[in-house]
């Protein structure tokens, strides 16, 4: 069988390795695992972003362990939280470097492997610790149960309430603020084009509600009845909609405009869980595009992430989807989203939510789905069949 040269640490020819062994999927998988471990350990704070290295043994039962290859190290200058599979070196058991990564990255100089010699010497304590850490990580669920790695998603779509943000912030802060200020907002902005459009949407929604016999719906008189009577009817309908937690565009659009005033006057500040900014930073560094899909208006979404307890997070977000795309519990909505993101297939998109019905709709559309278990979230059905996580950093 044809063979490839092996480059020693000093650049000299050290030996030869089987081309079939080098090109096996096992080596590619080991490089993927090693790069994922680098990023994961850095995200968890177990390792610094610049120092140290990591190694994964290339498993092949027909090859004695003393002769097995190792995927290790990283490209010089690459932060550990940004390491990709092609940054990982292939090493022989004696510490010799295979011609990986591509020499294009290093001109005519041989690749320089960083902090990897201790991993190659299995007799050392460091080597034993490294393998132990890898086993621990696998047990923690970073890899599939059959030791296969899953490819990174091209896009991540996030729900807000109960996923990025505590439900209590929405129910105890945002909703009461909108309810308490709807009358003042409508009165102050009644003649503006923005509010006239809001009132038009509300009129249309209330007309449908009255036909359907929706509880709490009351007729809205025409403008000839006077501004005060119109506003009073609007307030009554909006309060009923908020109480019923209705996910309708007419309500969400008006709420967004009311919240905008609150954020501009420093009366409101968005709240996200501690792991959210860390995960957004990590995904951004890996080139993963992140989007928001919420029943709240796109304006409200931008407000929440533009001024949070961790600063402005909008720089990590590529776009916003609201109910204009469709109801969050309908499969068609997720088909529309995946088609608009320019991915090759829906499974290139990972959707994160805390709502079982949304998870089902997204799964039926072909998206990958994870359900978030957060403080204050509602219970899930037994045997729901979805993978769950309690932090974005587990992904």
Image (cartoon, rainbow, N blue to C red):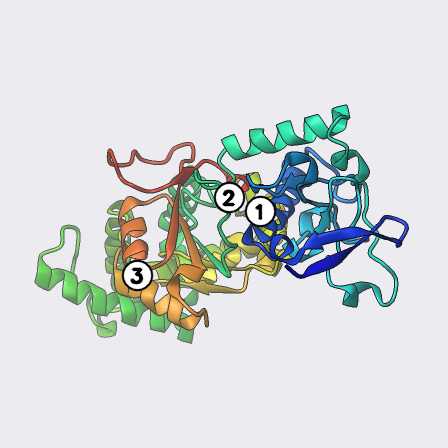
Q: Secondary structure at mark 1?
A: helix
Observer able to see residue 46: yes
Q: Which residue position holds label 2? A: 395
Q: x, y percentage for residue 140?
A: 51, 32
Observer able to see residue 190: no
Q: Earlier in the sequence, mark 3 or mark 2?
A: 3
Q: x, y percentage for residue 180?
A: 38, 47
Q: Earlier in the sequence, mark 1 or mark 2?
A: 1
Q: Which residue position holds label 3? A: 365
Other residues around mark 3 within 10 Å, as few (<14) / some (14–19) / many (≥20): many
Q: Earlier in the sequence, mark 1 or mark 3?
A: 1
Identity of the residue drawn at 42% across and 35% down: 374
Q: Is residue 367 left or right of residue 54?
A: left
Q: Secondary structure at mark 2?
A: loop
C-alpha gap between disc 1 and disc 3: 25 Å
Query: Cβ–Cβ below 8 Å for labels 3 and 2?
Result: no
In this rendering, which labeled residue sits more in front, label 1 or label 2?
Answer: 2
Q: Which residue position holds label 1? A: 279
Q: x, y percentage for residue 287?
A: 60, 60
Q: Is residue 249 above or below residue 277?
A: below
Determine which quarter of the picture holds residue 223.
bottom left
- Residue nearest the observer in this picture, 184 or 172: 172
């Amino acid at each position: 069988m044809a063979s490839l040269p092996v480059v020693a640490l000093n650049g000299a020819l050290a030996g030869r390795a089987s081309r079939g062994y080098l090109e096996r999927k096992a080596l590619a998988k080991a490089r993927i695992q090693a790069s994922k471990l680098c990023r994961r350990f850095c995200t968890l704070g177990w390792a610094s972003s610049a120092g140290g290295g990591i190694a994964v043994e290339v498993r092949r039962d027909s090859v004695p362990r003393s002769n097995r290859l190792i995927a290790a190290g990283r490209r010089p200058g690459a932060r550990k939280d940004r390491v990709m599979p092609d940054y990982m070196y292939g090493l022989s058991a004696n510490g010799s470097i295979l011609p990986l990564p591509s020499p294009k990255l290093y001109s005519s100089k041989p690749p320089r492997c960083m902090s990897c010699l201790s991993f190659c010497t299995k007799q050392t304590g460091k080597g034993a610790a490294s393998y132990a850490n890898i086993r621990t990580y696998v047990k923690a669920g970073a890899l599939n149960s059959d030791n296969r790695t899953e490819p990174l998603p091209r896009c991540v779509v996030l729900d807000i309430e109960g996923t990025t943000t505590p439900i209590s912030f929405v129910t105890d802060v945002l909703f009461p603020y909108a309810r308490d200020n709807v009358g003042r907002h409508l009165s102050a902005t009644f003649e503006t084009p923005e509010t006239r459009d809001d009132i038009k949407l509300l009129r249309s929604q209330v007309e449908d509600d009255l036909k359907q016999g929706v509880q709490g719906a009351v007729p809205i008189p025409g403008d000839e009845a006077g501004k005060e009577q119109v506003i009073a009817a609007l307030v009554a309908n909006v309060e009923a909609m908020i109480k019923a937690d209705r996910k309708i565009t007419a309500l969400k659009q008006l709420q967004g405009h009311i919240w905008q005033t609150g954020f501009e006057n420093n009366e409101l500040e968005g709240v996200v869980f501690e792991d959210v900014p860390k995960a957004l930073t990590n995904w951004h560094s890996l080139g993963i595009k992140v989007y928001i899909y919420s029943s709240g208006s796109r304006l409200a979404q931008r407000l929440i992430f533009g001024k949070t307890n961790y600063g402005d997070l909008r720089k990590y977000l590529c776009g916003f989807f609201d109910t204009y795309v469709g109801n969050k519990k309908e499969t068609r909505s997720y088909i529309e989203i995946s088609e608009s993101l320019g991915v090759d297939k829906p499974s290139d998109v990972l959707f994160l939510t805390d709502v079982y019905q949304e998870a089902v709709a997204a799964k039926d559309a072909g998206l990958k789905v994870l359900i978030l278990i957060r403080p204050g979230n509602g219970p899930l059905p037994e045997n729901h069949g979805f993978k769950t996580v309690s932090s974005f950093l587990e992904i």
